[in-house]
Image: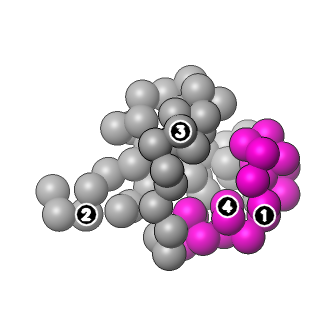
Amino acid sequence: MKNRLKVLRAERDWSQADLAERLGVSRQSVNALETGKYDPSLPLAFRIARLFGLPIEEIFQDEAV
């Protein structure tokens, strides 16, 4: 699954650790999400969407589409 996490995080000048703290996950989890090694759970996807004030679909895109 592709995502815009790295871009959205950079726009706010947040480090991976900053984003991880805001989401209540580890920095390694944020890195895995950004690199596509890990897809977020639905609750985490909703937390990410709320944090950035965007619909989930604007952050995450299915690579098959």
Mark linked to residue 43: 3
Q: Is residue 28 above or below residue 56?
A: below
Instruction: Tell me the magenta residue range.
Output: 17-35
Q: Quadrant of residue 50?
A: top right
Q: Residues within 10 Å of mark 2 (few under 14, many from 20)?
A: few
* Within-10-Å neighbours for mark 4: few <14, some 14–19, many 20+: many
Q: Are marks 1 and 4 in contact (CB under 8 Å)?
A: yes
Label 3 vs 4, first from the N-terminus:
4
Q: Which residue is mark 2?
A: 63
Mark 4: secondary structure: helix
CA distance separating discs 1 and 3: 18 Å
Q: Earlier in the sequence, mark 2 or mark 3?
A: 3
Q: Give me the disc on residue 27.
A: 1
Q: Which residue is mark 4?
A: 30
The answer to if 1 sits in the magenta stretch is no
**First in residue order: circle 1 vs circle 3:** 1
